[in-house]
Image (cartoon, rainbow, N blue to C red):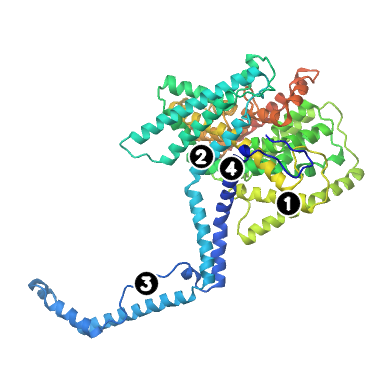
Amino acid sequence: MSKAASDSNTVSIPLSERAPILIILMLLIFLIFARTGENLHGQMTKLGEHLWEDYFSLRSDPPTPTCDPNFDIEKRLDELEAESSGGDDFDLMLDDGFDREASRVSLESQKKLCVQEYAQAEDIRSKTTPAVKAFRGFEHQLAQASIFATAQQQMFLLILLFVAAAVATLERHHIAFRPKISLLDYRVSLSLQLLVNGLLAFSAWMFRETAFNSSIEAGNPGLINGITFGSTALALISLYQRFNIPKDAEPGGTILRALLSVPLYTIAMLIFCFIIFVVQVHPAGLAIYFSAFFENSGTYLDVALYLWAGMLLKQTQLGERVFSLFTPWKLPPELLACVAVVVMAVPTAYTGASSIIILAMGVVVYRELRKVGTRRQLALATTAMSGSSGIVLKPCLLVVIISILNKEVVTDDLFYWGIRVFILTAIVFSFYAFITKRDPIKIAPAGEAMSESLANFKALVPYILTFVVMMVFYAFALDAYMDQFSAPIILPVLIIAVIFFERMISKAKPIYHDPERMDGVKASLTKSMSDASVHIGALLMLMATFHIMTGLGGKSVSPTFLQDMGSIYAVMGCLVVMFVLIGMFMESMAAVGMVSLMIAPIAYQQGVDPIHFWMTCLVALELGYLSPPVALSHIFTRQVVGEEEAALAAQEGDTFYYRHERILLPLMVMGTTLMLVAFGPLIIGYN
């Protein structure tokens, strides 16, 4: 990743790194433009109707009538009479003779209609001025862009995945338990990456050969070729990386530490390769399962847009401005931790997943907690949980995916109960935070804190106004409103507007210095796109790999044992265990796909209410993300906070609980919430 001084307005990125980042940027901008174009197209048709009467008729050139407006009626009547008198004997028996007057009336009506068609066509041509042609041309281009973007979503995701994965591979920034430090770390990690990328490329070539040599025409040759060449490019990059280990790698290392530096997608892919190549003996199977990832391309493109929004948010002062409202009150660490969990739920809901908000805002949460003297273990626990409670709130992408995959539930019902689950989680977190506090609860006097807090709020008002102005613009100009469907395309634009406000209008100085935050607009946008490219590649590659598990599990595993249970409590207990285990080892969207395919239909048959089922599932998955051995949320937290802080935290604590608080507190909070959500409705008779 390129480095820049904090006071620089430019970010220097080599051309070799700039090209793939530009490709990703253009893809994301085109997606925003094309999807916004749907709303803009609708507004343009309304405007056209307002500017030109009968604009809907002017939107295309009228067809030239094929009739003859000047035909001779008498001559045509003679022809019809001659034709009628030349029929066979059977026709003569049925025919009462040629009715010349009735035919004349019919022909006169036809001639009149023909004249009207010519007049109407001429009228439309006369009204089709150069201004109309220019206006409708632009409108048609918007419509075509939207249609093209919808039709080519699979190809967009394919390009985005492999280009971003190439960036993450070149930057050695795939998601792992620990970063690579020693020479052995690099050798083991890069060798295994080369192995799995090579096996994926081999499988893709086998898949391509089978598909193109079959008597049945390949359904999507572009996708097959894309996976083949993309995976081959990844394998070649891995080969290059394997023999170009950084010269500053520390000598030595241990095999256990080296294995922990292997990317998660590599570990998962190795397991799948063993199953597919050795157990199933189906070399093309790996690429076939991998290709299923592109079936829900729109959803994963939204993930990329949310990640970009998260990295843009990281370039703003919004997070520190929000936390500055609570700083004057000198809240004790435990109380500020409760505030952080509640406050961060909102951006989590609007950025789609807990992993995204940790990557974008985790360092802000951790830093604000540490500023008031919060112990490192509690700060790490809170940062890891900062996105956990928000996944049930509107307009979270994960809930939208559930409603798409399961016709038994709708987003409105899920969000309705999600608010209640969120409140419950906040209450449980507060309970455990207070019973584990080490110092008395003391806050600053209201008279002293209120004035400073209000002063800090004044600095936040321009941000609020910026959001309001942009939302009003979207509402009136584009008839678009922030919801679970439009959030991915509106959020990046809103946050870019905030960046413009901060860098070009606002004179307020940052509350604290952040070396990752650039000063100029161009530098900020460049830095956000550079960071987003790496995270998009790492996260989408992990999602695509875990999606293979959905295909394997859906074909080989089904919890039919649930059908043999006579108690709804036993069924729910088994569901809870399965959900948590899935959350431990799978990324959220792949997990939702697997649960929808394998578990949900059987659970519904056993009488589990669909809303109750999915509320329990979401809480259990979050518990899984916070649970060893994988604990994705903790991995992301460690990544943004840094190894040094994580190492210092491991040295703190005078009892077992406080030495492991970063793990134990989230487990207690989400575990208790899960028990209440899973079994509470059964006890009170809701289900």
Residue position marked by numbered label 4 in the rendering: 24
Residue position marked by numbered label 3 in the rendering: 64
Say if mark 2 contacts mark 1, CB within 8 Å: no
Q: Earlier in the sequence, mark 3 or mark 1?
A: 3
User: Residue type at mark 4?
Assistant: Ile
- Distance from disc 4 to disc 1, alpha carbons, whole Å, reads 21 Å
Q: Pinpoint residue 559: horizontal percent, then vertical percent.
A: 48, 27
Q: Is residue 183 left or right of residue 563?
A: right
Local SS, label 1: helix
**651 over 228 or under it: above or below:** above
Closest to the camera, between mark 4 and mark 3, is: 4
Q: Earlier in the sequence, mark 4 or mark 3?
A: 4
Residue position marked by numbered label 2 in the rendering: 158
Packing grade of label 2 (10 A; few <14, some 14-19, many >=20) is many
- Distance from disc 3 to disc 2, alpha carbons, whole Å, reads 44 Å
Q: Pinpoint residue 319: horizontal percent, then vertical percent.
A: 76, 42
Local SS, label 4: helix
Q: Quadrant of residue 560?
A: top left
**Could you say which is closer to the camera, residue 460 or residue 128?**
128
- Distance from disc 2 to disc 1, alpha carbons, whole Å, reads 32 Å
Q: Is residue 9 left or right of residue 477?
A: right
User: Residue type at mark 3?
Assistant: Thr
Residue position marked by numbered label 1 in the rendering: 500
Q: Earlier in the sequence, mark 2 or mark 1?
A: 2
Q: Earlier in the sequence, mark 4 or mark 1?
A: 4
Say if mark 4 contacts mark 2, CB within 8 Å: no
User: Residue type at mark 2?
Assistant: Leu
Q: Is residue 343 left or right of residue 301?
A: right
